[in-house]
Image: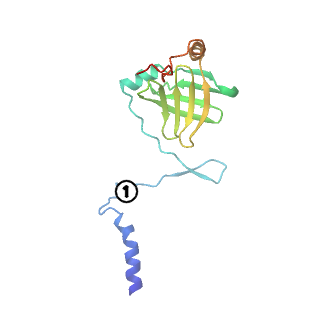
Amino acid sequence: MTAILLLAFLALPAWSQVPASTSKSAQAKPAQAKSKPGTSKTQVAPKAEPETPMGPDELAIADRVHKGQLPCELGATVRLEADAAQPGYFYLHGKGFRYRMHPVATTTGAIRLEDRKAGAVWLQLANKSMLMDQNKGRRLADECANAEQVAFAENMKTNPPPSLIDTSGTGR
């Protein structure tokens, strides 16, 4: 008798998670398994992530994104192109990766594109761009630049910006 009560008690949390009234139309159907012709493995179709609606701020950011083939350090290149079907969204391609990114507002003025699902972040500064993997905490591509960014970086070498830290001692 004690064993039966113990089993009933252990099964109680599983019963409590089932809704009290469910209709057949309200029950979720499991994902259909699809198999590729000629293979015995099955794959579950990925769920489409809902589109984030673009506001005027995000669309303004998207207009400033440098698109095209961008050379990066160590001979790598990335290609950033606008999604023709969805304004404000971009595809970022490189060796071994492809991300669908959208603009995110920042307080620093840097242009930031994100693929939240993959954890990828594209940062575009005045002198370079870089691709970060937030999940692994590392850069996937760095020193990527178009002609405008290269010119800005060269100008920074000859005309460096003022130091943020006053080293003259007269800053009081």
Determine whether, in the image, residue 82 is placed left or right of residue 76.
left
Comparing 64 with 20, the one in front is 64
Q: Quadrant of the N terminus?
A: bottom left
Residue drawn at x 40%, y 34% as measured from the top left: 52
Q: Residue furthest left?
A: 21
* Quarter-of-image position of residue 40: bottom right
Q: Is residue 148 above or below residue 115?
A: above
Quarter of the image for residue 137 reads top right
Is 87 situated above or below 161?
below
Q: Residue furthest bottom?
A: 1
Q: What secondary structure is marked by label 1?
A: loop
Residue type marked 1:
Gln
Q: What is the total number of numbered labels drawn onto the structure image?
A: 1
Rendered residue at 49%/41% (across/down) = 117
Residue marked by disc 1: 27
Residue 90 x %, y %: 51, 28
In this view, which residue lies farthest toward the right?
75
Quadrant including the C terminus: top left
**Residue 130 in the image, given as x and y percentages of width and height:** 57, 29
Q: Could you say which is closer to the camera, residue 82 or residue 166?
A: 166
User: Dot 1: within a 10 Å radius of its alpha carbon, few (fewer than 14), some, or many (20 or more) residues?
Assistant: few
